[in-house]
Image (cartoon, helix red, strand yellow):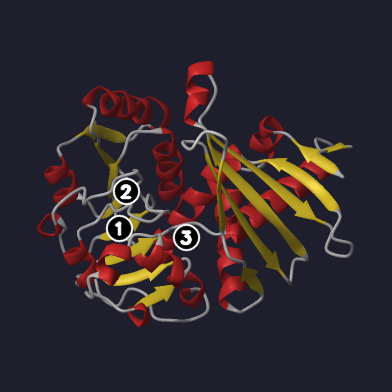
Amino acid sequence: MFFVSEERAKRVVSTADAIETIEDMFREYGQGEAVVFPVVMGKGPDTSNKFSMKSGLMQARGVVGLKVGSYWPGNREQGKEAHASSTLLLDPETGYPHAFVEASNLTALRTAAADAVATKYLSREDSTTLAIFCAGHQAWFELLAVHEVRPIKKVLIANRFQASAIAFAKRIRDELGLDAECAEKEIAAKSADIIVTVTAACAPLFKASWVRPGTHISAMGADSEGKQELDPFLISKSTLFTDVVQQSVSVGEYEAAYKAGLITMDQITTLGEILNGAQGRISNDEITIFDSSGMALQDLAICSLALNKACKQGKAIKI
């Protein structure tokens, strides 16, 4: 059995690597070569402690396993991260443990990579202004991924706490050399070619009327029942895409609009279908939305990549 630590996984997988392997994964999923199994939700001894188990099978790659994602808010009092992710890859021949990969950084990468793949195929190619609704940890990964696939020149950050937005804008200017500034929600939404939302909100972040024709939106935050970042009316008048349709209407961004009867499941196209020839964006005036609630295949794909690269570089530990 192999072990790949958080630090070693971080060293061997780049943003470009993540985008490539996640794009391949969505393509395989769309071809029926990969399967997602039901998500299992659990709680720790304290009711505020939660975890999920997501599992899947990538038949063509011979990759099978599961990821455990935990949220222990009390960790912050001990100077630890509240979120943690660990992935167990099984030997496809025996079912015995094959590798244990610490995957908190890889989870951030794979999430952003899905955003990048959606942006690559659904946004206008001339998109240069990005609005990010969040200034937290994941926002940086989303920015790097979108910047990898589109010629972003200006970044607007809308965040509840202005100080965080200002600091984030400075980091973008200093490390990427892009024009970046904090902005009011209305200005950010009205100015953007691409909008990325990556919050834990349970209500719309901005008005539907603020989104201009031709905008692409990647809604990355909703991953459990009740979470919501977009106005259901905006969803009802847009062209809809997702990772897993059933998740998108039960625990994803489309839940509220679906339950209100504003959309049906057959209006939603998966990214896997797009990568296998289905129609994506059809005009420069169309508003497209990609809902990412997350799927185990993303975790298996990127952790398998990290394991393979770590083994080749002698950075995986055999235990």
Residue topped by disc 1 = 217
Above or below — where is 121 with respect to 277? Answer: above
Instruction: Left or right? Give the position of 186 relative to 270.
Output: left
Give 24 or 226, whichever is nearer the viewer: 226
Residue topped by disc 2 = 197
Q: CA distance from mark 1 to mark 2?
A: 8 Å
Residue drawn at (37%, 53%), measured in percent from left and top?
222
Residue drawn at (48%, 68%), measured in percent from left and top?
244
> Label 2 amino acid?
Thr
The image quadrant that residue 291 belongs to is: bottom left
Give 186 or 74, whichever is nearer the viewer: 74
Q: Residues within 10 Å of mark 2 (few under 14, many from 20)?
A: many
Residue 86 in percent (x, y) is at: 66, 42
Furthest residue toward top: 78
Question: Looking at the image, is mark 2 or mark 3 earlier in the sequence?
Answer: 3
The image quadrant that residue 209 belongs to is: bottom left
Q: Residues within 10 Å of mark 3 (few under 14, many from 20)?
A: many
Residue 30 in percent (x, y) is at: 56, 76
Above or below — where is 202 with respect to 301? Answer: above
Q: Secondary structure at mark 1?
A: strand
Q: Nearer the viewer, mark 2 or mark 3?
A: 2
Residue 196: mark in rendering: none
Residue 124 in percent (x, y) is at: 31, 64
Q: CA distance from mark 1 to mark 3?
A: 13 Å
Q: For residue 124, say whether it is visible.
A: no
Residue topped by disc 3 = 117
Tally the marks: 3
